[in-house]
Amino acid sequence: MIDNKHGQIISGWLQGCKHVASPNCGPRPLGAPVELVVVHNISLPPGEFGGPHIEELFTNRLDPQAHPYFAEIAGLTVSAHFLIRRNGDIVQFVATTENAWHAGLSNWRGRDKCNDFSIGVELEGT
């Protein structure tokens, strides 16, 4: 059976991928169009791939005792719209209609607060 919705975005959510809702998001300014895609790289712990730790970080469930590096980042409230794993799997954490917390204090072409007008994509890698 063919999934006709695979790859479509419905109410801000990409169909055909894993959805893990992150609390680390907020509303976009009313009427603000998406004008920027910010691509980051991430691995947790650094240099290790495929584990659950990125999802745990983006959902505020990362155990600071699980690895020495995690104690350094404990308490961060960050997210991205999408994570693309090394095997190509996609995980979505925040609807594209919302503001994910991925760009921090940022500026692009003279505009501050890039989270307000961007999509954040994390590539699993270093």
Image: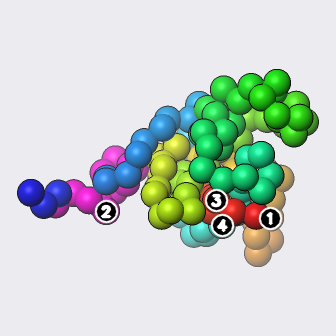
Quadrant (top left, top right, bottom left, bottom right) of the N terminus: bottom left
- Residue 85, by quadrant, is bottom right
Inter-mark Cα distance, 3 to 2: 20 Å
Mark 1 = which residue? 107
117 vs 3, nearest the viewer: 3
Quadrant (top left, top right, bottom left, bottom right) of the C terminus: bottom right
Which callout, 3 or 1, points at the residue further toward the start of the chain? 1
Mark 3 = which residue? 124
Which callout, 3 or 4, points at the residue further toward the start of the chain? 4
Which callout, 4 or 2, points at the residue further toward the start of the chain? 2
Whether residues under marks 1 and 2 lie with C-beta atoms below 8 angstroms apart, the answer is no
Looking at the rendered structure, which numbered label has been put on residue 7?
Answer: 2
Direction from residue 84 to residue 75 in the image, left or right: right
Q: Residue at x 46, y 57 (%)?
A: 89
Inter-mark Cα distance, 3 to 1: 24 Å
Q: Nearer the viewer, mark 1 or mark 2?
A: 2
Q: Is residue 3 above or below residue 110?
A: above
Inter-mark Cα distance, 1 to 4: 15 Å
**In the rendered structure, which segment of residues is drawn in magenta?**
4-14
Direction from residue 41 to residue 15 in the image, left or right: left
Inter-mark Cα distance, 3 to 4: 11 Å
Inter-mark Cα distance, 4 to 2: 19 Å
Is residue 28 in the magenta section? Answer: no
Image coordinates for residue 35, horizontal then vertical, percent: 57, 69
Mark 4 = which residue? 39
Q: Residues within 10 Å of mark 4 (few under 14, many from 20)?
A: some
Q: Indicate the amino acid at tag 4.
A: Val
Direction from residue 102 to residue 87 in the image, left or right: left
Q: Element at badge 1?
A: strand
Inter-mark Cα distance, 1 to 2: 30 Å
